[in-house]
């Protein structure tokens, strides 16, 4: 085997990770609405059922970053979902975070899912305390979105690609090299299909993986609250977003392997690619 062939053979297979932030539907309340908690939870539960049905039909495993409060609302469904998909932590509640929520959310979600919770994503993608995450028993974090999102954050100074940080694997949300075109729900909602496809392909080739995220409630009809949500959230959701996601999965299936974030980060930590015949 020549050196060039050896390098090609040892290169990890490209990966795609789909993740969904399973949370209370509280976004409109930030803009003047007054949706009661029970209604927020019921909408979140409807979104979760919708997206689990979609990804199961697509035949891919995903990571569900779940608030403990949301998980307890659908407690009877979580064990079955956890047998097919990864349950990770999105904190205790979506509207407020306290430092003890790192440990508390992990404990409560593990009791619900009957499996270990190894990943964390902060609500609204705010900064995290890396030593506290490690102390709480997490092995990876996916809270960084290295783009500028007006009104939220400007993270263009952050690294784009996965890295080790004090022993914790950090996996930022994918964005394109160079211009940092967003590749989370915002890009799927608003980029023309051809541009989205080209940008996904280019980023996959460059980084060797894609880390894409959405909210389950985005796949519902949320027009009732359109006046209380930003314009960027009012357009391109529901069935249209579901079709775009399905088309993307179909296109990427021949180019990469779909895995959960825990599987990706485990391989990243060890530097080894899983057996091609193993579980995705």
Image (tube, rainbow, N blue to C red):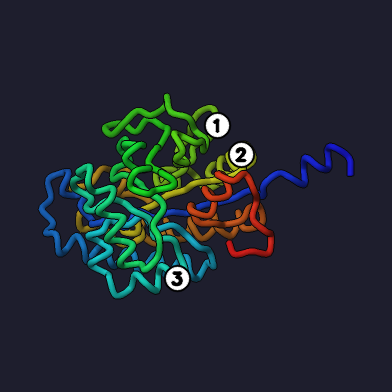
Any part of residue 209 in sight: yes
Residue picked out by circle 2 = 202
Residue picked out by circle 3 = 83
> What's the residue at 10%, 53% (across, down)?
34
Mark 1 or mark 3: name the one nearer the start of the chain.
3
Mark 1 or mark 2: name the one nearer the start of the chain.
1
Q: Position of residue 235 (x, y in %)?
A: 34, 49
- Look at the numbered disc 1 and give the secondary structure of its residue: loop
Q: In the rendered image, which quarter contains the N terminus?
A: top right
Mark 2 or mark 3: name the one nearer the start of the chain.
3
> What's the residue at 59%, 50% (across, down)?
15
Structural distance between the alpha carbons of marks 1 and 2? 8 Å
Residue picked out by circle 1 = 177
- Look at the numbered disc 2 and give the secondary structure of its residue: helix
Q: Quadrant of residue 215?
A: bottom left
Q: Looking at this view, name the residue that lies furthest to the front.
A: 135
Q: Looking at this view, name the residue that lies furthest to the right.
A: 1
Structural distance between the alpha carbons of marks 2 and 3? 33 Å
Structural distance between the alpha carbons of marks 1 and 3? 35 Å
Q: Position of residue 94 (x, y in %)?
A: 23, 50
Q: Mark 3: few, some, or many residues within 10 Å (few <14, many ≥20)? A: few
Residue 140 circle label: none
Q: Mark 1: few, some, or many residues within 10 Å (few <14, many ≥20)? A: some
């Amino acid at each position: 085997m020549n050196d060039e062939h050896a390098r090609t053979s040892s290169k990890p297979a490209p990966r795609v990770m789909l993740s969904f932030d399973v949370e209370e539907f509280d976004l409109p309340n930030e803009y003047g609405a007054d949706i009661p908690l029970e209604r927020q939870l019921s909408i979140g539960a409807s979104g979760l059922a919708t997206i689990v049905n979609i990804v199961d039909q697509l035949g891919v495993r995903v990571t569900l970053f779940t608030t403990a409060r949301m998980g307890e609302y659908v407690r009877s469904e979580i064990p079955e979902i956890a047998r097919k998909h990864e349950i990770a932590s999105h904190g205790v509640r979506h509207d407020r975070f306290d430092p003890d929520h790192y440990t508390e959310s992990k404990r409560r979600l593990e009791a619900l899912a009957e499996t270990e919770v190894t990943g964390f994503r902060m609500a609204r993608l705010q900064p995290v305390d890396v030593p506290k995450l490690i102390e709480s028993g997490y092995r990876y974090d996916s809270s960084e979105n290295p783009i500028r999102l007006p009104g939220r954050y400007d993270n263009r100074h952050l690294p784009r690609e996965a890295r080790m940080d004090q022993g914790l694997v950090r996996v930022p949300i994918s964005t394109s090299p160079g211009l940092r075109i967003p590749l989370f729900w915002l890009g799927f909602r608003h980029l023309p299909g051809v541009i989205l496809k080209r940008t996904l392909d280019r980023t996959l080739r460059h980084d060797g993986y894609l880390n894409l995220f959405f909210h389950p409630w985005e796949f519902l009809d949320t027009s009732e609250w359109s006046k209380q949500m930003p314009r960027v959230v009012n357009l391109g959701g529901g069935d249209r977003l579901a079709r775009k996601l399905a088309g993307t999965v179909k296109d990427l299936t021949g180019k990469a392997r779909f895995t959960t974030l825990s599987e990706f980060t485990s391989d990243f930590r060890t530097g080894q690619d899983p057996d091609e015949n193993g579980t995705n």
